[in-house]
Amino acid sequence: MKSSLLLFSFLVCSLLPCMGQTRQELETRYVSVMGDYARLYIGKVEVPYDTQLYKTLPYLNEDGSFHVGAVGTEELVYPEVALRFDVYLNQLVVESPHSHVRVVPRKENVQFFTLEGQRFVNCNGTFVREEYAGKKLSLFTYIYKEQDYPDIQQARKRVQFKSKWALWLVQDGKVKTVKSLSDLQALFPARSQEVKRFADEKKLKFNAKNRINSVKSIVEFLDS
């Protein structure tokens, strides 16, 4: 208890001379002062994957490397955090700055995080990649992994994963999965012909390669 009070006093004294700074600068200083004691690093310790049992690791970056990004909670934005994203478990993993403990923050406390130029947000308890955030409509890509047939070499089985994704259109807090032009037309029946005309004029394609950009173009059009 005494040590906690001393730490709190140290934090307050460290921040007082900086009250003229911006919120972002204060948040950065808070993380710098608190280090491993910052709330972000209080959570369950990650259970690592046994590389002897897994052929590939189910992270966004399959080698499992940590990359610097930002993490936003209700209270603060934590800049320059070492993090990685476990796609199979849909969980964020952060590495504390001093002791290098790998922690899984409480998901309900994380509003968003950024990783290699991509922004992931917490949508109804699931981390999804943000494609478009508009006035009334939002579009996300739900990236996930499923276990595939095991890799068998010399009578030894190793788990491997296959990557999958789905597009989520969110309106008034409700999530709809979108795969095609007809899905969008069905969701907006009053503008069905207008949507079809727009897609034809822009020569939009909805195969796997072009689907995200095509759906995003229509969502932006509908939200304008």
Image: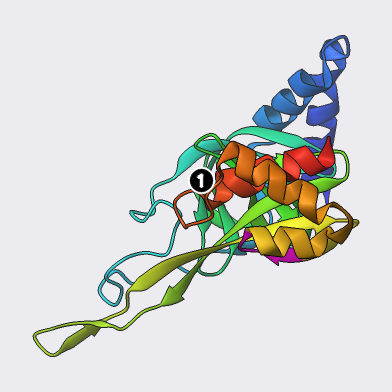
Residue 6, compared with residue 21, is above or below; it is: below
Report the magenta stretch's main SS: strand
Along the line of sight, the residue nearer the viewer: 218 or 166: 218
Q: Is residue 138 left or right of residue 63?
A: right
Query: Label 1 amino acid?
Result: Ser
> Would residue 217 be seen by someone viewing this image from the given angle?
yes
Q: Which residue does the numbered mark 1 point to in the structure image? A: 99
Q: In x, y percent, where is residue 113? A: 65, 43
Residue nearest the observer in this picture, 134 or 108: 134
Q: Quadrant of residue 217?
A: top right
Q: Secondary structure at mark 1?
A: loop
Q: Residue at x 76, y 28 (%)?
A: 27
Identify the residue shown where x is 77% and y is 22%. 24
Q: Report crowding for label 1: few under 14, some 14 to 19, many 20 or more residues within 10 A (C-alpha).
A: few
In this rendering, would 194 be left or right of 203? right
Residue 165 image position (x, y, % from top left):
53, 62
